[in-house]
Amino acid sequence: MNAVRMNAAYLEPDVRLDAGTRRLHAAFLVRNDSPATWRPSEGFGVGYHLFDAATGTLIVDGARVAPECEVKPGETARVRLEIELPREDGRYQVLLSPMRENLCWYYEQGWPFLLVETSTVDGAARVDRVRVATRASLAREGAVRAVGRAFVYPVSTVWRNRGLIRVMVRRDILGRYRGSFGGAFWTIINPLLLMLTYFFVFGVVLRDRYDPQASWSSFALYFLAGMLPWLAFSEAAGRAPSVMLEHRNFVKKLVFAVETLPVNLVVAGLITEMFAILLYCAFLLAINHTLPGALVWLPVLLIPQILFTAGVSWFLAALGVFARDLGQIMGFVLTLWFFLTPICYPENKLPQAAAGILTKNPIYVLVHGYRSIFLQNQAPAFGAVWKLWLVAAVVFLLGHAWFYKLRKSFADLL
């Protein structure tokens, strides 16, 4: 078939909605603007497809009606169709187009089609717009909307579902330690034990290898300052590959905002870090008898840290649905990442040949910034911080776009 030559036009469209039955009654004339005759005996007809406008998912492959007789080039045929709209809230698109049974839908070949845009809010359906469109025009409109949505939708999704995130995070933290003697106090005990373990290994056992002149307290402050951002990032990134599998029952519910599941991990990791920061501040007070005034700069690092962690978590959560071994791989990657970042050793111990690359690591910038605030009582270096903000914003947007693109396949794979 020649998609360039074959065409159709839609005349006198009359689309009405019966609110009681939720049925669209569509009536129109379709004119044959192609050089071929439309023959019902060859399977020609006019039908509809119903799509979810948000995801582009085909919901209903609707009924077809055949013209009463052959439609020659330039002639018209009267079409009447009834379409039942879904009861679930959302935006829907009804595409009415000529087709040939078991051969093709002509709108997929580039033909124009009659597009009915509808929406359902609180169970009440309405017709928003009726127009003639093509797949190319819809693609262009979608590209324009996607650019704006890429900047707005991740933030609006988190804000709109903040109550759900709060409930899920609380459930995650309490459920993780349910039945244990410590209960929710393990949220404090875990980071404390982890930091003490690393400090014993690198600050007591291996301290002479890295800096024999440093006192235990100075090395502890240096090391633990670097652990603060790593705790939150590693917890979220380590759990993200399996989060969709762990909550597969939620993923299969159409009304559940699945993009909040990786965000729950980010918030849970942030809560762990907040307790660790409180412990660290208590440690500072015990040793230095004061807290640095540069703590007011901490949000300048926390915000890009959250954005970067969320973007990585969205990416890993979506990829983990397709690659079930990703959780084991990330365990190795995070271990390697930890030791390539000067957390447990001085920054001057980085190999000179690789220092130029390793210092571009976003976690390195965070670690260096935390030490500037807590240990040097200085604002983080502006040159590194603005680059961190830029990288974090890009990772945040791309991570969400990746997750949003793949989420329609989650229910089938889980």
Image (tube, rainbow, N blue to C red):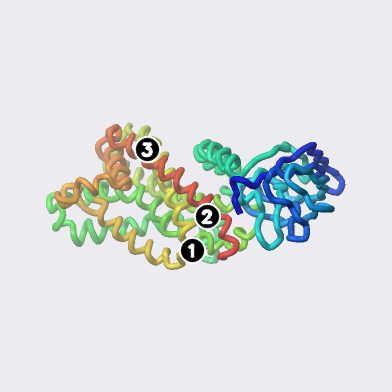
Quadrant (top left, top right, bottom left, bottom right) of the N terminus: bottom right
The spot of residue 46 in percent (x, y) is 75, 52
The spot of residue 48 in percent (x, y) is 73, 51
The spot of residue 204 in percent (x, y) is 21, 59
Q: Earlier in the sequence, mark 3 or mark 1?
A: 1
Amino acid at dot 3: Leu
Amino acid at dot 2: Leu
The spot of residue 321 in percent (x, y) is 50, 62
What separation in Å lies between label 2 and label 1 (alpha carbons)? 10 Å
Is 404 left or right of 81, judged from the image as shown?
left
Is 405 left or right of 164, judged from the image as shown?
left
Check residue 322 in the rendering and tell me which mark sits there, or answer none.
1
Which residue is at the front of the view, 78 or 160? 78
Instruction: Answer whether residue 77 is visible to the viewer in this image.
Output: yes
Disc 2 + disc 1, Cβ < 8 Å: yes
Circle 2 residue: 406
What separation in Å lies between label 3 and label 2 (alpha carbons)? 24 Å
Q: Nearer the viewer, mark 3 or mark 1?
A: 1
Q: Residue at x 19, y 48 (%)?
A: 355
Q: Residue at x 64, y 47 (%)?
A: 6
What separation in Å lies between label 3 and label 1 (alpha carbons)? 29 Å
> What SS does tag 2 mark?
helix
Is 406 left or right of 1, judged from the image as shown?
left
- Circle 1 packing at 10 Å, graded few (<14), some (14-19), many (20+), is some
Check residue 390 in the rendering and tell me which mark sits there, or answer none.
3
Q: Residue at x 23, y 58 (%)?
A: 202
> What SS does tag 3 mark?
helix
